[in-house]
Amino acid sequence: MTAPQSTLAALAGTWALTRELDPAIGSFTGFARFAPVEDGSLDYREDGELLLTSGWTGPATRRQRWSA
């Protein structure tokens, strides 16, 4: 296993996530999940709540594919 592949394998699982966006925009709080895919990559998905400085709060999701 290469070093990049080992790094991806170490990320697998669910992680708590808090992200401060630009101070004029707001913040995100939720979970990041790294799920292994058959081709050796990871499916990365964030699910949580977006809080805007305007006071609006709502669900937010982001999804990516990570590979070595």
Image: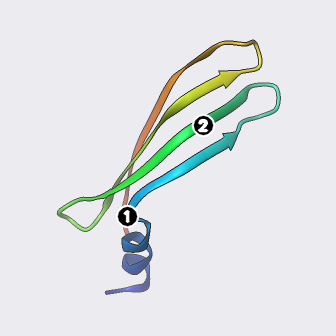
- Residue drawn at x 17%, y 63% is 38
Q: Which residue is mark 1?
A: 12
Q: Position of residue 51 (x, y in %)?
A: 66, 23
> Mark 2: which secondary structure?
strand
Q: Is residue 25 left or right of residue 2?
A: right
In the rendered view, would you say 27 is above or below 39?
above
Counting the numbered discs, the total is: 2
The one nearer the camera, 65 or 10, is 10
The residue at the point 50 percent across, 27 percent down is: 60
Q: Nearer the viewer, residue 62 or 58?
A: 58
Question: What residue is drawn where x is 44% and y is 66%?
Answer: 11
Q: Quadrant of the N terminus?
A: bottom left
Whole-percent x, y for residue 28 in the image: 62, 34
Q: Do the residues under discs 1 and 2 have CB atoms within 8 angstroms?
A: no
Report, in whole angstroms, how far the alpha carbon at label 1 lies from the one at label 2. Answer: 19 Å
Question: Which label's residue is closer to the chain start, 1 or 2?
Answer: 1
Task: Find residue 19 and report its horizontal and vertical position in percent.
Answer: 66, 42
Q: From the image, which quarter does the C terminus lie in?
A: bottom left
The answer to which image quadrant residue 35 occupies is: bottom left
- Figure check: 67 above or below 57: below
Which residue position is annotated with label 2?
Answer: 29
Of the residues shown, which amino acid type is indicated by label 2? Thr
Side of 18 relative to 9 (left or right): right
Q: Position of residue 4 (x, y in %)?
A: 43, 78
Direction left: furthest residue: 38
| Residue reaching furthest to the right | 23
Residue type beneath disc 1? Ala
